[in-house]
Amino acid sequence: MGKPVYLDYNATTPIDPEVISEMLPYFQIGFGNPSSSYSIGRENLEAVNRARKQVAALINARPEEITFTSGGTESNNHAILGAAIAHQGKGKHLITSEIEHPAVTNVCRHLAAQGWEITWLPVDKAGRVNPKDLESAIRPDTVLVSIMHANNEVGTIQPIKEISEITRHKNVLLHTDAAQSIGKLETDVEALGVDLLSIAGHKLYAPKGIGALYVKDGVGIENLMFGAGQEEGIRPGTENVAYIVALGKACEISAGNIDKNYQHMYDMREKLLEGLLLKLKNIRVNTDLTNSLPNTLSIAFDKVDAHKLTTLISNEVFISTGSACHSGITEISPVLKAMNIELLIATGTVRISTGKYTSVEDIEFATEVISKAVQKLL
């Protein structure tokens, strides 16, 4: 990518050039409304249906189980609120974890204000939910469990398959936010056993403003929007065809390169960590390297303020002091708090995330820049 070096792929990804090429015609001559009966309308409908198949194929779902949304936040909102409203006759109890994305935690707080009871599961020092804690928390009035597939800040992969075995046995719905895992890990809805799954396009080399929600066949969720009936009425409104096409193409590309991309992102992360450990002694790794996304490194530099570090290198290397959704907030993130990371370590923590475009040269340059900046701040 050239300098400056971008190492914040968990915040967002650049759009794949193939994705751009695929979507451009739908801004130009292919601008028809998919609900129209004439040729450019029918062509757009065909494009939407093709994209639905591409998204479904990536997660081993059926096309009719895919609903297009504006992104991960909308998908999470619709999954949780839609399930809660549709099944509230059973009860008003929901279970989630302490390290979820705000697009989940804030929905849960909204429901709590409406009279729902929320159980917040703790995590261990690696940021992992214990399935036994979940099993103990389920009650007869539990409607839904929402646990992310992989954490956006430290990369911890949650035991979703084990969790789903519990929820299925207890007849409780399971939602997982897979925004960070799609395209980095094999994400098979049948193998995971989930009922609802959220996808965010801009974490997958597609544009911002497009996502998808998987709803397992037979799982009823309440409509939150009402209109002319597009997307089987779940998400009415004229489809954003160009962006839907983009997400479909991004999923198709990802499906053919999962293993290759996994290995590359992993190799780049490991090379960076090895380089930093050679140059610096005051390092604490927060990421559980044996059970995490291949591209994610949460790392702390003792006696170094993370905000000062990222500011110092901001013209050369792009990294984050935590989730991009928390930018501007000086208190430590809820994720690090839940993991019981000491305050001084948390304030020195940065998140570095590699991507499919990260090169060896990028890593070598970033290692040098970060090391010199840390030494300067000591």
Image (cartoon, rainbow, N blue to C red):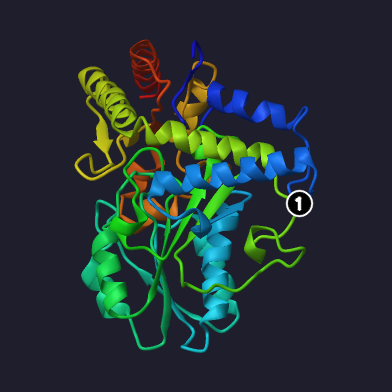
In this view, the residue in front, 373 or 46, is 46
Q: Is residue 331 left or right of residue 191?
A: right
Q: Considering only vertical position in the picture, is 103 above or below 33? A: below
Give the labeled residue for mark 1.
35
Q: Amino acid at mark 1?
A: Ser
Residue 109 seen in the current view = no
* The quadrant where residue 216 appears: bottom left
Place of residue 243 in the rendered image (x, y in percent of width and height, measured from the top left) = 64, 39
Residue at image x 25%, y 17%? 279
Residue closest to the eye, 298 or 107: 107
| On screen, residue 11 above or below 341 | above
Residue count near mark 1 (Cα–Cα under 10 Å), binned few <14, some 14–19, many ≥20? some
Residue at x 25% of width, y 18% of height = 275
Counting the numbered discs, the total is 1
- Residue at 25% x, 58% y is 124
Residue 2: x, y in percent?
A: 49, 10
27 left or right of 267?
A: right
**Coordinates of residue 288 in the picture (x, y in percent):** 23, 44
